[in-house]
Image (tube, rainbow, N blue to C red):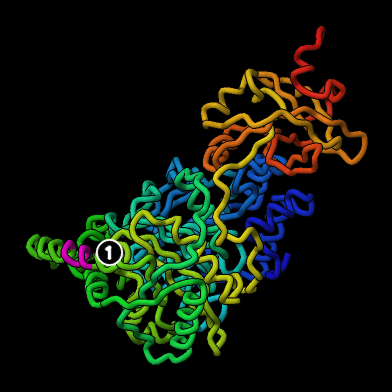
């Protein structure tokens, strides 16, 4: 495996399904490359290869019912993973959680494989990526430049193609800045959409758990898994209104400005009508994060820092303990101003469908950050207001500048409108030609999301889910509607699976000697299909089934290994006749 190998979920699952790749062979290749490249400061703790391989073995053969089957991911080290220390990039703070955060647990249940814990700006305090005792993760395009923080390790691990996706956190932009600086996607959901349980708090009322991925589809799938959302993606609107900030600052970098102007034109080409909103209240709101709201950081880890001042980086210690200078009067004054600004910002946004912004104004070198304390503030001018108003936002690659560094843009929607972002953000990424991560892979192809998905999907059932049989109630529970009884093309063998309760058959496609099997067609919503699929146990799976008239529909299939010792009942031509046969 080389840096040119693809880790997007569609490519991995296609390789798993074909037998060209297994999770175990993928893991061995990833670990070998990580050992060879020795990317500095990305990992705080890495899962041992033997343990990762044991997880791969536990998953068994490819199971398409697991949306993240065999997908490698990693976690920012301020989020709990059972059995791995959580340090928040402060060794003295380390503790060993017994359970994973709910978000991590959901990803593991969906088949993902955790490779370890990732570096960050200590206590998630910073947007630069250089504030960690574990070292400075390098920008994948030029090691002289900042990789972005605080989720620095998460951004670099995805951009360097070590993992398919990584979890980060975001208070002021930490889930977006590393994405823009390393040519990947940063998905920050609406505040409160994803559980923050099992996360070391920065500002607890603003914190969000975020996803870094190489493309929008993978990031959105991880979000769906974490929140248990089975709704289909919303289509891309044909016409929409978008705003751009009235105030723009690129700190003298004309390449960034040119990249921005190209991105605006692309959004117009997708059907967008451009408008402008007064950015002053958004800037003022974002600046409040470094005023009395620092007190909330003090509430999170202040007691620990007071007791272990030598164990904390001076810049981190000074920022957090700086919250002590604010009075209750300061806090309530700020809180009242916050509410007024929040209302003003949301009112301005409601006149548009989306807000388009640069994610960061430009790139800064590590040396520039060391000599200019304002670098952190400059990186966050378009990011730090967002969590104050609760909005979802997605940073996607938009361009490459003349100096070879990437440029990212952010699309923002109103709180709760997370699904509204996916299709448009994906379209913007595809139009950019920026590709994915360090290798700039082409994006995976799939059905045009600009076309509305059908309201109903058709599912073929061949066994206990048929009308009146033992599991038919599961169909009725998701409001499925019987359509017709038909037969498959004569390319399948049918088996009675042993040791199943209730008894179930398994249908396997074969090259020669196939039979035509009776099946029932049922219609249900796509949302219902997602709920239903979650109940389908291995070795059964939902795949494509061909009917006798050549139509391909979703339907029940069985993995071939499971029928090796099963009774072949193909001669019955269907499950009902098999059940009616006596003796059996």
In this picture, residue 24 sits left or right of residue 256: right
Q: Residue 118: percent from the left, percent from the top? A: 49, 61
Position of 248 with respect to 552 (left or right) is left
Q: Which residue is located at x 71 percent, y 60 percent?
A: 29
Instruction: Return the residue at label 1.
Output: 309
Q: Is residue 314 above or below residue 144?
A: above
| Residue 308 in view of the camera | no
Q: Quadrant of residue 313?
A: bottom left
| Residue found at the very far right of the displayed protein | 513
User: Relative to 368, is 496 above or below?
Assistant: above
Report whether 219 appears left or right of 198. right
Neighbor class of circle 1 (other Cα within 10 Å; few <14, some 14-19, many 20+) is some
Name which quarter of the figure residue 57 lies in: top right
Residue 41 spot, x, y in % from top left: 51, 68
Q: How many marks?
A: 1
Q: Position of residue 189 (x, y in %)?
A: 40, 57
Q: Is residue 325 left or right of residue 359?
A: left
Q: Nearer the viewer, residue 390 or 124?
A: 390
Magenta residues (range) = 339-344
Hey, which residue is sitting farthest top in the picture? Answer: 583
Residue 106 shown in magenta: no
Tell me the quarter of the image containing the C terminus: top right
Which residue is rendered at x = 29% and y = 76% of the image?
277
Residue 570 in view (yes/no) = yes
Magenta span: chief secondary structure: helix
For residue 520, which quarter of the picture? Answer: top right
Query: Which quadrant is the N terminus positioned in?
Result: bottom right
Q: Would residue 342 be counted in the magenta stretch?
A: yes
**Horizontal and vertical percent position of residue 443:** 63, 67
Residue found 72% across the figure and 68% down from its top: 2
Q: Is residue 125 positioned above or below 533 on the image? A: below
């Amino acid at each position: 495996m080389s840096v040119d190998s693809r880790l997007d979920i569609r490519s991995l699952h296609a390789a798993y399904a074909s037998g060209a790749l297994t999770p175990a062979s993928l893991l061995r290749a990833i670990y070998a490359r990580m050992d060879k490249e020795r990317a500095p400061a990305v990992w705080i703790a890495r899962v041992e290869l033997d343990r990762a391989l044991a997880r791969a073995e536990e998953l068994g053969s490819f199971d398409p019912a697991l949306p993240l089957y065999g997908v490698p991911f990693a976690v920012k080290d301020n989020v709990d993973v059972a059995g791995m220390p959580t340090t928040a990039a402060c060794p003295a703070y380390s503790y060993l959680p017994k359970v994973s955060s709910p978000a991590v647990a959901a990803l593991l249940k969906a088949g993902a494989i955790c490779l370890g814990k990732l570096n960050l700006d200590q206590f998630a305090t910073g947007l630069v990526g250089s504030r960690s005792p574990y070292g400075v993760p390098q920008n994948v395009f030029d090691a002289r430049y900042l990789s972005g923080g605080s989720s620095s390790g998460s951004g670099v691990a995805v951009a360097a193609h070590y993992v398919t996706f990584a979890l980060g956190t975001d208070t002021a932009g930490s889930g977006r800045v590393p994405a823009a600086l390393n040519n990947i996607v940063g998905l920050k959901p609406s505040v409160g959409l994803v559980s923050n349980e099992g996360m070391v708090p920065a500002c607890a009322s603003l914190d969000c758990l975020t996803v870094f991925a190489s493309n929008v589809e993978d990031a959105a799938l991880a979000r769906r898994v974490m929140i248990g959302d089975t709704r289909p993606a919303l289509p891309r609107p044909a016409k929409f209104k978008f705003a751009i900030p009235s105030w723009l600052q690129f700190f003298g970098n004309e390449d960034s400005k040119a990249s921005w102007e190209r991105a605006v034109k692309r959004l117009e080409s997708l059907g967008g009508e451009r408008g402008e909103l007064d950015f002053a209240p958004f800037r003022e709101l974002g600046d409040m994060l470094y005023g009395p709201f620092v007190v909330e950081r003090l509430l999170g880890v202040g007691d620990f820092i007071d007791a272990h001042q030598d164990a904390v980086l001076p810049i981190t210690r000074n920022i957090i303990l700086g919250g002590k200078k604010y009075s209750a009067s300061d806090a309530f004054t700020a809180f009242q101003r916050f509410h007024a600004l929040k209302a003003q910002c949301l009112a301005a946004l409601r006149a548009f469908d989306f807000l388009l912004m640069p994610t960061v104004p430009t790139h800064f070198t590590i040396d520039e950050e060391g000599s200019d304390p304002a670098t952190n503030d400059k990186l966050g001018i378009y990011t730090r207001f967002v969590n104050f108003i609760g909005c979802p936002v997605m940073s996607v690659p938009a361009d490459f500048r003349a100096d070879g560094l990437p440029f990212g843009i952010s699309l923002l929607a109103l709180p709760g409108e997370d699904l509204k972002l996916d299709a448009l953000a994906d379209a913007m990424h595809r139009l950019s030609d920026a590709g994915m991560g360090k290798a700039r892979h082409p994006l995976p192809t799939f059905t045009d999301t600009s076309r509305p998905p059908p309201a109903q999907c058709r599912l073929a059932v061949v066994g206990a889910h048929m009308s009146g049989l033992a599991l038919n109630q599961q169909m009725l529970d998701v409001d499925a509607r019987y359509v017709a009884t038909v037969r498959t093309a004569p390319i399948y063998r049918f088996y009675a699976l042993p040791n199943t309760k209730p008894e179930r058959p398994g249908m396997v496609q074969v090259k020669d000697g196939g039979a035509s099997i009776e099946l029932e067609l049922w219609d249900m919503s796509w949302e219902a299909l997602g709920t239903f699929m979650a109940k389908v146990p291995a070795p059964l799976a939902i795949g494509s089934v061909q009917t006798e008239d050549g139509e391909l529909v979703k339907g029940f299939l069985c993995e071939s290994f499971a029928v090796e010792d099963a009774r072949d009942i193909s001669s019955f031509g269907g499950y009902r006749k098999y059940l009616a046969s006596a003796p059996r």
